[in-house]
Image: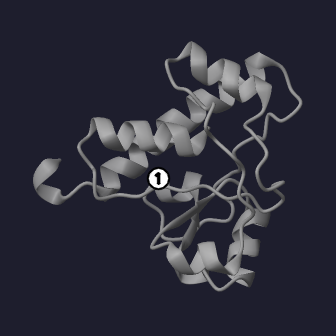
Amino acid sequence: MAEGIAAARARALGLDDIEIRSAGAGAFPGSPASDGAVRVAAARGLSLDAHRATLLTRREVEWADLILTMSPSHLMRVSELGGGGRAWLLTAYAEGRDTGVDAGSIPDPIGGSDEEYADTYEQLEELIDKVLDRLRPETDQ
């Protein structure tokens, strides 16, 4: 959901030079988005039908200029793969903190109700909007 939300929001802001990818620390490569994520995103006009999971590897970490993670354990995995200087918890980065493993995790709704997916979706929207505001050139803000 985060990748889809971020890509749609970046396009809407005209941030065409930002390339957004997602990768999971425990993803099953090639798996589609979960049914709950697909339903909740579709209800908000966002299609996740084309999404396929990618496993986080050193290659993805080396590619990225900025890596935002959902939890401290994901942040640790990114650091283990060499991305420590370019990685933050999404919650910390959205709040403008330089660090912050105590900033809080984004709940993973996998296997949960559509309500849980919707809560996570709304939290992601809010945080991603803050992140994109930080990434916009000063003259655009």
Residue for point 52% across, 76% down: 63
Image quarter of the N terminus:
top right
Q: Amino acid at mark 1?
A: Glu
- Residue 54: horizontal and vertical position, in percent? 71, 58
User: Residue 88's spot in the image, x, y percent?
Assistant: 57, 66
Image check: 47 left or right of 39? left
Residue beneath the point at 70% across and 28% down: 37
At horizontal 71% and vertical 50% (from top left) the residue drawn is 105
Tell me where residue 129 sits by quadrant. Answer: top left
* Residue at 63 percent of width and 78 percent of height: 59
Q: Is residue 54 left or right of residue 98?
A: right
Tell me the colour scheme of the image: one colour
Q: Residue furthest bottom?
A: 82
84 vs 34, nearest the viewer: 34
Along the line of sight, the residue nearer the viewer: 84 or 101: 84
In the displayed structure, 128 sits above or below 102; it is above
Residue 114 x/y as whole percent: 76, 18
How many C-alpha atoms fall within 10 Å of the one at disc 1: few (<14), some, or many (≥20)? Answer: some
Identify whether 66 is placed above or below 39. below
Q: Which residue is mark 1?
A: 95
Image mark count: 1
